[in-house]
Image (spheres, rainbow, N blue to C red):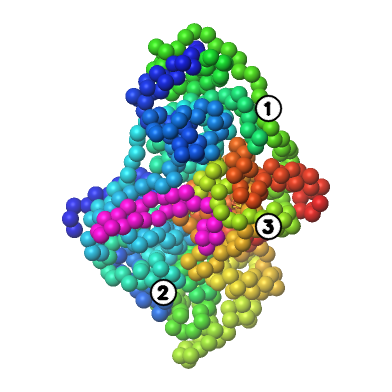
Amino acid sequence: MTNHECTCGENPLVPQICNVIKITDETPDTKTFRVQTLDGKKPFDPMPGQLGMFSLIGVGEGMFSVTAKGEDYLDFAIKRCGMLTDALHEMSVGQQVGVRGAYGNTFPVEACKGKDMLFIGGGIGLAPVRSFIRYAFENREDYGKIDILYGARSAKDLVFKEDLYTNWPAMKDTKVHITVDCDDEELACHVGFVPAYLEELAFKPDNRMVVLCGPPIMIKFCLDSLTKMGFSNDQVITTLEMRMKCGIGKCGRCNIGSKYICLDGPVFTMAELEGLPQEF
Amino acid sequence: MKLAKNKLQQAFDLMAKEANLLVPMKIEGVTKFAPWGAEGELAMDAVNTLLPPKDALFPQTEKMYKYKTRLTQVESLEEIKETDKQIIFGIRSCDMHSIDCMDEVFLTRGYVDSFYSRKKENLTTVAIGCTKVLPTCFCDSMGLNPVAAPTADVQLNDLGDYYAVKAQTEKGEALVNLLKPLLEEGDGEAAALECTLKVNMDGVQKKLMNVKMFESDIWQETAQKCIGCGTCTYVCPTCYCFDIEGKECGNEGYKFRCWDSCMFSEYTRMAGGHNPRPSKKERVRNRFLHKLAYFEDRYGKGSLCVGCGRCVADCPVDLDITMFIDKVGALKEAGSND
Ligand code: SF4
Ligand code: SF4
Ligand code: FES
């Protein structure tokens, strides 16, 4: 490294330079990038659910949920779905990127204390949920039973396999339920769509909070199932995605009604969403 | 204090020594605020200029930071800080209030936008009361007074051969002090003035905030003729939305922000292709709701439309926000279609 100048920290729109220190292939189209500042720290200290702006200098910036934080790093799980993410997927360890954040509100980790938790993720939707799951395990005594229900198209599309198969099932009072839409690799797991499996598992709504993230169509059907099972809308928490540029409520584009998703979101309860204009 | 009109040029020369002085000018047929001394003619009687002076604080394109890279490494990254002193001379009440609105957006709610705040700190505003109105003016219906801009640093009022000069802030006092050698004792009251267009905002914000209103047929009807040209957002003094883009040449580049428009479909289109505002109906709805309802709901500082009338005058298909306000006002209740 040559001498490096940067004006990090003062201006929320100017990124900090970070090293990519580890890249994990999750699925054929999703990779997790671990980043660290040049002096070996985590770029910022997000709470579960918060977002970070990730930029490949010279290519572009995109807003992603922070999947995990460690002592001295942050993880972003990023799925390929356009020019920027294609370029990010070409990166190798040692690459330098820009990172700014943390943006947005957080999962209601306090309000959920003392409750049983049901985490539901579909596809890459497990990425935002994972930050809360990890938080719950770090503060295991604060939460009751934990159920994690995760679905993907097929076995090769399952993200965070080590967590799903090894780490999480080993935790106290925790069950992990995995389902794939089609089982082409004869994995020993449930086959079928998430909403159907959810009903099959017949969770009781008493003293339980649900965190639900995934493709819109899955969210819609899971909501129907949860309602059938007796869950009310203020027991179900989700995250919204909108196109974002600034992350700090200034550039104007991420609004739903008078709320800015980059500031007032991305986390909402279904009850809160019902009070907003249906424009997402 | 008062300033004789025949000393205006001397006053400009004095101010231009201290700061970048922006005055209303007509340049190639377009009235706008431009540096004193620019090629063109002074347009003190333009009432509101075709282009608002918002670019003094929020330039059409603004460099944010520059960087150098070497292969996969970032060699340097440096924020670009502009701290030139500026004076806007001759700003009208409507445009002055648009700055109050932008202050709310850029300086409050958890984050201060440093690019904006640095410019604001170095800006002095000299407002001038209107003595005539344009056919499209309606600022007094939006709660403003065409002859008084209370948040301007200095208020001028036209009294025939003189301008009455009143400092309203500390910055304003400093400016009046600078002009002292040219000023004379005395003052005078500005004649009250009424706008041409009238709208009644009573109850409109509340109706528009009602979720039932969101699904009303009024949006389709209103948006039908919009051609999505973006003129309304370009000329609007309170439209502040921006895009962030980069420019690179070899191993150097910079990131900049530039005005964007909610009337363009790109504005909300996501990387995967989904667009929550896919057609002009959703886009016109969002623009009008932002101006007339959301801004008040979020910041509690009134409407984001200051009644300057620019979009009314310049929309190529005459999509008129005042007619829309009247239409909503006439609805029996939110969400009804008559
Ligand atoms: S100026 Fe008129 S036609 Fe152009 S985008 Fe605005 S409303 Fe639509
Ligand atoms: S919406 Fe139209 S009338 Fe209102 S401030 Fe903007 S340009 Fe002026
Ligand atoms: S991303 Fe700019 S306002 Fe939300």
- Pointers 1 and 3 within a single chain: yes
Callout 2: 10 Å neighbours few (<14), some, many (20+)?
Answer: many
Q: Residue at left 25%, top 64%?
A: B72
Tag shown at residue B224: 3
Q: Tag 3, which chain?
A: B
Q: Residue at left 38%, top 29%?
A: B37
* Residue B40 visible, this angle: yes
- The residue identified by callout 1 is B194
Q: Is residue B183 left or right of residue B188?
A: left
Residue farthest toward the top in the current orientation of the protein: B185
Query: Is the residue at mark 2 in contact range of ligand 3, meaning its CB lies under 8 Å from it?
Result: no
Depth order, front residue of B282/A275: B282
- Pointers 1 and 2 within a single chain: no
Q: In this view, does A130 lie above or below B158?
A: below
Q: Is mark 2 on a helix, strand or loop?
A: strand
Q: Tag 1, which chain?
A: B
Q: Which amino acid does label 2 sit on?
A: Thr
Residue B265 among those drawn in magenta: yes
- The residue identified by callout 2 is A30
Q: Is residue B157 left or right of residue A16?
A: right
Q: Tag 2, which chain?
A: A
Tag shown at residue B214: none
Residue A117 among those drawn in magenta: no
Q: What residue type is labelled 3?
A: Gln
Q: What residue type is labelled 1?
A: Glu
Callout 3: 10 Å neighbours few (<14), some, many (20+)?
Answer: few
